[in-house]
Amino acid sequence: MYFRKGCLVINLSGAIPVVRIHWTALALAFIVNGFRFEPVAWLAVLFVILIHELGHAAAVLKARADVVAIRMDALGGCCEWVGSVTRAQRLLIVWGGVLAQLILFGIALVANIFIGPYISDFLYPFLYILLQWNLILVALNLLPIKPLDGYDAWGLLSMTLKDWRRRRHSARRRRLTAETIKKIQELERLEPKLRPNPEIKEMMNQIIRRAAAEHKAKNQVPENNED
């Protein structure tokens, strides 16, 4: 741990190599706390930002990409990472910070229910930040404005849902085609015994040819459009 160019640099030996906390992050905590001198509340704001970035980092590692560093400054925080990920993994990375904050809110809510009445006045601002300002920061972060997470989060969510629906429809078509082919094969095995009318047989052949042509045409269209 050391100071360099206005940053507190914390070197870690693990999946997250380094955490850099710029002095302006403390100014952000001061502003969020309403310009009041409450160091415990400032620490809570920095803790919320850190949990948010750790949520991003956890999603990056889940996608088998590499975390370069976690940075905190006056604009909030940033999880720097490198690697090739799919669209679904990118979606999880973008939403990882908000999900981590919501988990933190749930833990703080339970803590408030059980130990809130007994917590000291000195520590109460910490719990207050985890409950109220945590949710406010979630809402602000999801605004579709660059460089907030909401700028990418909603678009990626929409594209991922479209991909999921397309894969679902394709799987349904394949299943129906397989069931149709299975029934046709059963009819072909029964054909010597049934001896169907020639007109019915020709109609069945036309249906088989049409289904095979549609199946071939649909299989020529690519189904996955992930980055």
Image (cartoon, rainbow, N blue to C red):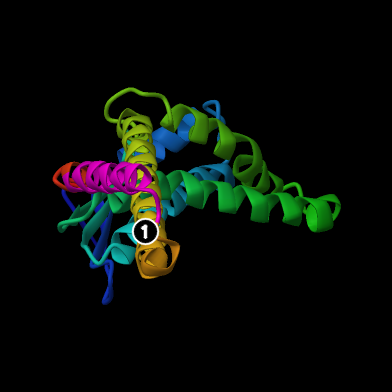
- Outermost bottom residue: 13
Q: How many marks?
A: 1
> Residue 80: x percent and y percent?
22, 51
Magenta span includes 167: no
- Location of the N terminus by quadrant is bottom left
Query: How many C-alpha atoms fall within 10 Å of the one at disc 1: few (<14), some, or many (≥20)?
Result: some
Taking depth in this image into account, of 181 and 153 the one nearest to the observer is 181
Lateral position of residue 164 relative to residue 30, left or right: left
SS category of the residue bearing label 1: helix
Magenta span includes 206: yes
Taking depth in this image into account, of 127 and 64 the one nearest to the observer is 64
- Outermost right residue: 117
The residue located at (47%, 44%) in the rendering is 98
> Residue 120: x percent and y percent?
77, 52
| Vertical relation: 105 (above or below) 13 | above
The amino acid type, in three-letter code, at marker 1 is Ile
Q: Which residue is mark 1?
A: 184
Lateral position of residue 47 relative to residue 71, left or right: right
> Residue 130: x percent and y percent?
61, 45
Taking depth in this image into account, of 99 and 224 the one nearest to the observer is 224
Q: Which residues are magenta?
A: 196-216
The residue located at (22%, 63%) in the rendering is 65
